[in-house]
Amino acid sequence: MATHTEQDILAGLGDIIDEIAGVPANEVTPDKNFVDDLDIDSLSMVEIAVAAQDKFGVEIPDDQLKDLKTVQDVINFIQK
C-alpha cells in the first residue's frame, strides 16, 4: 500500500475542498477546522470524505467522519 506524505494528503485535500466547497486550496492548512474556519457544512463534508476515499484509497466510516474536525484529523486518519 502506498504511504501518502502529509504534504501529498494536504495538497490532495486542498484540491478536493476547493472543488467541492469553493475554499481556496491555499487556505486549507492542517490547523483549520472544517466548520469553524473553512465554513464547510456536513453535506459537503460527506462529499469531501467520499472524494478523499477515492483519492487516497482509505475507508472513512460515517461514524468516524463526525470526529474529523480539522484538516490535520483527516491527514492523521489517512496516514494510519
Image (cartoon, rainbow, N blue to C red):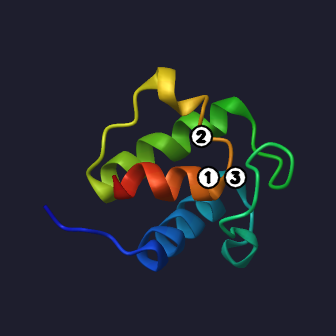
The residue type indicated by label 3 comes to: Ala
Which residue ends up furthest to the top in the rendered image?
63
Residue 24 sits in which quadrant? Answer: bottom right
**Mark found first going from the N terminus, 2 or 3:** 3
Instruction: Name the residue located 83 percent from the left edge and 47 percent from the top edge.
Output: 39
Disc 3 to disc 1, how far (Cα)? 4 Å
Residue designated by label 3 = 21
Residue designated by label 2 = 68
- The disc at residue 20 is 1
The residue type indicated by label 2 comes to: Leu
- The secondary element bearing badge 1 is classed as helix
Q: Is residue 38 above or below residue 5?
A: above
Disc 2 to disc 1, how far (Cα)? 17 Å
Q: Nearer the viewer, residue 1 or 15?
A: 1
Q: Residues within 10 Å of mark 1 (few under 14, many from 20)?
A: some
**Mark found first going from the N terminus, 2 or 1:** 1
